Image: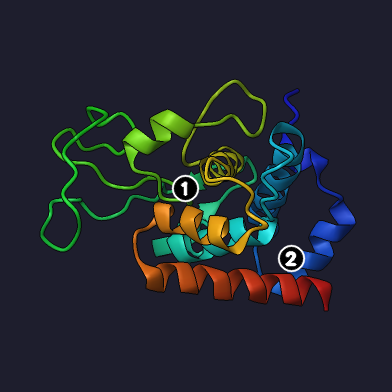
Amino acid sequence: MATGNADLVDPGWASRTSAATGIPLRALLGYAGAELAMASEAAGCNIGWSTLAALGRIESAHGTHTGSVVGDDSVTRPGIFGIDLTGVSSARITDTDEGRWDGKADIDRAVGPMQFIPATWETWRADGNGDGIRDPQHIDDAALAAARYLCHYGDLSSPDSWRRAIFAYNHLDTYVNAVAQAANEYAGRASG
């Protein structure tokens, strides 16, 4: 049986924090498990579960966007796919994966609960549940990949590094501010 990052999370903490924040338990286990995994993998990063949860909230409503659900197997179904990145109402990103991750062979679109562009997924993809498969629709895999991506920008306990990392995730100051607000809200609810 595969064991993954979610198994690192204290079940009592997860249950209490899910109730206090409104984050679905399975998504919260993915975020918190990624934080704990990164504490061993990149101790100087200092990524917090609340940052990952804030991204998950903004990117896909914790895997529930357009009626999707993170199942008992931690896979988001139906899969979450962003808009076609044609350059009309977004940046233009031509196909980088021959449709492997996003089902589109002519253009790219973001995939999964953490909304990775296929080329970014290829660089940072992760196996957060230890099953030998790296799936952007799997909350543990996606949360760990997002954590690794953000940690690439340095010590996230530094406000400047944190803002730079979140800005790299989505190049809008309003996005960075929204993530900060959501992360602070979640941390406050969890400790209150």
Q: Could you tell me which residue is drawn at 48 percent across and 73 percent down?
A: 178
Q: CA distance from mark 2 to mark 1?
A: 21 Å
Q: Residues within 10 Å of mark 2 (few under 14, many from 20)?
A: many
Element marked by disc 2: helix
When asked about the image quadrant of residue 144, the answer is top right
In percent of the image, x 60 and y 63: which residue is there?
A: 159
Q: Position of residue 31 (x, y in %)?
A: 65, 51
Q: Amino acid at mark 2?
A: Ser
* Residue 20 in sight from this viewpoint: no
Q: Considering only vertical position in the picture, is 175 above or below 131? A: below
Q: Is residue 180 visible?
A: yes
Q: Residue furthest left?
A: 88
Can you say which quadrant of the picture contains the C terminus? bottom right
Residue beneath label 1, please? 77
Query: Which kind of residue does numbered mark 1 sit on?
Result: Arg
Q: Quadrant of the N terminus?
A: top right
Where disc 1 sits, the SS reads strand
Please give the name of the residue rendered at 81% of the width and 61% of the height, measured from the top-left corner: 15
Where does the image place residue 36, in percent across and percent down from the top left? 76, 43
Give the label on residue 48, or none.
Answer: none
- Image location (x, y in percent) of residue 23: 65, 66
Give 117 or 62, whichever is nearer the viewer.
Answer: 117
How many dots with numbers? 2
Residue labelled with disc 2: 18
x 27%, y 29%: residue: 97
**Label 1 neighbour load within 10 Å: few <14, some 14-19, many 20+:** some
Are the residues flagged by discs 2 and 1 in contact, CB closer than 8 Å?
A: no
Residue 132 lies in what quarter of the image? top right
Measured along the vertical axis of the image, is residue 131 above or below residue 174? above
Q: How is the image coloured?
A: rainbow
Q: Is residue 90 left or right of residue 7?
A: left
